[in-house]
Amino acid sequence: MSAASTETSAQLPASASRVFFQPPAGVGCAGSGPIPRDDPVQRKQGKVTVKYDRKELRKRLILEEWIIEQLSDLYDCEEEEMPEVEIDIDDLLEVNSEDDRAVKLQESLIDCYKPTEVFVRELLGRIRGMRKLSAPTKKGL
């Protein structure tokens, strides 16, 4: 350990530099014995596993990469130089009609000097059948 890191850790209060984990009931370090059942921290403990739909996330990532590529072509520039264009797929999926989605997309692309109709038509075709990403599902409460 270097002197610089020693000085930094010495300045922190003892409780701020430590992380504590509460093991499940009856589990402890060797020889430490079981954890008492009336421990208030133990009663709060729960286990939640969050699972995202990986297939839907993968489709969304591929679509977003395609959108960036198409916008680079439409604006004739690299991603870093591209003007601020916000295309929210979930917002588009909330809109009921295809025509309203097209209008919403055209509004986002108002500053583009190239024709955007082909891009809009293709994007609408790609999002057809997709679902809005909702809060992740929880398993095992």
Image (cartoon, helix red, strand yellow):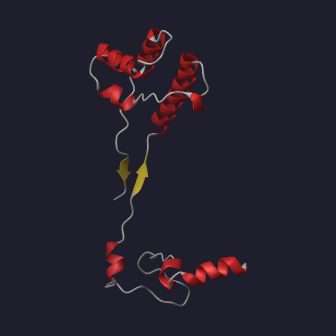
Q: Position of residue 126 (x, y in %)?
A: 45, 19
Q: Position of residue 107 (x, y in %)?
A: 36, 19
* Residue 33 position within the rendered picture, expressed as x and y whole percent measured from the top left: 47, 89
The residue drawn where x is 59% and y is 32% is: 80
Determine the residue positioned at 34% across, 26% down.
93
Residue 117 against residue 32 in the figure, above or below: above
- Report the quarter where the N terminus lies: bottom right
Residue at the spot x=46%, y=14% of the render? 122
Q: Can I make out residue 101 in this image? A: yes
Q: Is residue 18 visible?
A: no
**Location of residue 34 with respect to 139 vertically, above or below:** below
Q: Is residue 125 left or right of residue 78?
A: left
Asked if residue 65 lies left or right of residue 130, the reply is right
Where residue 82 appears, as percent x and y from the top left, is 54, 27
In this view, the residue farthest toward the right is 2
The answer to whether residue 66 is above or below residue 16 is above
Q: Quadrant of residue 90?
A: top left
Closest to the observer: 74 or 45?
74
Q: Point out the residue furthest to the left here.
A: 96
Q: Nearer the viewer, residue 26 or 5?
A: 5
The total number of labels drawn is 0
The answer to whether 61 appears left or right of 108 in the picture is right
**For the C terminus, which image quadrant?**
bottom left
